[in-house]
Structures are given as C-alpha cells and as structure tokens.
Image (tube, rainbow, N blue to C red):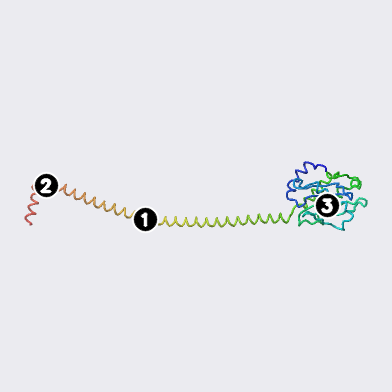
C-alpha cells in the first residue's frame, strides 16, 4: 500500500483517536483494493483488514441489494456494491466496531464522494493496488469528519462535563453561603463584644471619676486642715498673748 502523505497523517491523528470508523476502502470484483484508509494503523493490522476486504470484494456480485453487514469477531464489514461502471463494479467497504454507526448513511456518502472525485471511467478500470489512495484522501477525510465522530457520545460527554461543572458551582455556592453565615456570626459576635466593651468602658470611666473626686476631696480637706494648723501656729507665734487669751477664754467658758 502507498504511504499516506505526512500532512494527512498529522491532520488525522486527533480524528483517529475518537473515530468510530476503523477502515475505509474501495475495491473491484477481482479483489484489488484500489484505495484504502486505515484510520489508526498503530492499533490495527492493515494487512489483515485489506485481505478481509479483498475477499468481500471478490464476492461483490453475490452481495444482496443495499448495504450488507458482515461480522467477524466483533468487527463489522459494511459493504455496498456500486454499479456506476457496469463492466467494473466497485465495492465500497467501511469497517467499524461501533453499534451506533449507520451503514446506509456512511456508504451513501462514501460512494457519492468517491465518484465525484474519480470522474473518469478509465481511472477506476485501470487502477492498480492502492493507486487511487492518494487521490481519495479528501474522500476519506470527509467521510471520517462526517461519520467518524460519535456525536451522541460527545454530546453525552459534554453534558456530563456541564453536569459536573454545575455540581461544582452548587457546591461552591453552598460553601460561600456557609462562609457568609460564619462571617455574619463573627460580625454579630464582634458587635456584641463592642457593646460589652462600651458598657465596661463607661462603667470604668465613672468609677475612675469617682475615685478622682474622692481623692480630690481628701486632698483638699487635708490641705485645709494643714493650712488651719499652720495659720494657728503662725498666729500664736506672732502674738502669744492673743493665743493665751484665747486659751484662757476657753478655760473660763469651761
């Protein structure tokens, strides 16, 4: 088989990983595979697939009308006989393991795209083994693009991602609400502590004011007594007679 162009190999890597299609080929009733595409050659034996498809092509005229599905060890060989060229009918084969792949749609598009690409009767009738593979790369690419992806599985995967994201968002919202409640509780506690601190401050203020007033009264009284004593002593020292007279008057009164 001819080697595939490097650009096609690079461009199909991602598509091959998710493709439901394993192998595409076109052959004639002599069993010659004129064009083929092994979607993921690292995981599939290209030679075995080609031999199996070659045997199907040789049975081409015995295929029933419409699409035929031949199964072997869990692999489905979906084949269709195209009689566009009466003398050299072409057999189109799509190999898959997917249960969701519609053979009718795949083979219809495969046949239509092939004959749009291979427009000359001589191109097909004179084709040798794999001689049309390079020319049919756009055909394979389009079929893989349209039918290779499992859109249902992809949609389910996207829904699962969205569901998980929504669950995470709900969980985050619950966490935020819990944090908000904790913050609100802390704010209430702080407000209560602030009120207690204010009440304590006022009480302490009045207590300190009363203590200051008490000490002020004591101090003033002490100063007055001291002054009175000093004044009395001073008077007695300057005028002893007056001081003695004052004492005598006190004794007489007694």
Task: State which tag comes first along the sequence, 2 or 3.
Answer: 3
Q: At x 9% / y 46%, what residue is drawn? A: 240
Q: Residue furthest right?
A: 87
Residue 103 image point, x, y percent: 81, 56
Q: Nearer the viewer, residue 1 or 170?
A: 1
Q: Disc 1 or disc 3, which is closer to the eye?
A: 3
Identify the secondary structure beneath mark 1. Answer: helix
The circle on residue 93 is: 3
Structural distance between the alpha carbons of marks 1 and 3: 92 Å
Q: Which residue is mark 2?
A: 236
Q: Residues within 10 Å of mark 2 (few under 14, many from 20)?
A: some
Give the residue drawn at x 53%, y 57%: 178
Q: Nearer the viewer, mark 2 or mark 3?
A: 3
Q: Quadrant of the N terminus?
A: top right
Q: CA distance from mark 2 to mark 3?
A: 144 Å
Look at mark 1 in the image and give the residue it sits on.
Answer: 200
Whichever of callouts 2 and 1 sits on the residue coming sooner in the sequence is: 1
Crowding at dot 1, Cα within 10 Å, few <14 / some 14-19 / many 20+, comes out as few
Marks 2/1: CA distance? 54 Å
Image coords of residue 82 (percent x, y): 88, 53
Label 2 sits on a secondary structure element that is: helix
75 horizontally vs 210: left or right: right
Give the position of the C terminus as an image quadrant: bottom left
Number of numbered labels in the structure image: 3
Where is residue 5? Give x, y as percent: 79, 41
Secondary element at image label 3: strand
């Amino acid at each position: 088989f001819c080697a595939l162009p490097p650009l096609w190999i690079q461009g199909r890597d991602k598509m091959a990983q998710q493709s439901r299609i394993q192998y595409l080929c076109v052959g004639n009733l002599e069993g010659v595979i004129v064009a083929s595409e092994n979607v993921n050659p690292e995981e599939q034996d290209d030679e075995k697939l080609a031999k199996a498809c070659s045997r199907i092509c040789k049975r081409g005229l015995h295929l029933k009308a419409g699409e035929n599905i031949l199964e072997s060890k869990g692999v489905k060989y979906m084949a269709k006989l195209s009689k566009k060229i009466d003398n050299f009918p072409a057999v189109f084969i799509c190999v898959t393991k997917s249960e969701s792949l519609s053979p009718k749609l795949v083979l219809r598009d495969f046949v239509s795209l092939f004959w749009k690409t291979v427009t000359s009767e001589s191109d097909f009738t004179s084709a040798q083994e794999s001689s049309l593979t390079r020319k049919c790369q756009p055909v394979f690419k389009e079929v893989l693009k349209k039918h290779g992806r499992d859109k249902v599985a992809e949609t389910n995967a996207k829904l699962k991602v969205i569901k998980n994201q929504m669950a995470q968002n709900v969980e985050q919202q619950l966490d935020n609400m819990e944090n908000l409640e904790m913050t609100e509780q802390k704010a209430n506690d702080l407000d209560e502590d602030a009120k207690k601190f204010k009440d304590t401050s006022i009480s302490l203020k009045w207590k300190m004011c009363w203590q200051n007033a008490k000490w002020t009264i004591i101090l003033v009284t002490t100063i007055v007594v001291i002054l009175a004593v000093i004044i009395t002593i001073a008077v007695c020292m300057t005028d002893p007679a007056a001081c003695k007279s004052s004492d005598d008057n006190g004794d007489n009164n007694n």
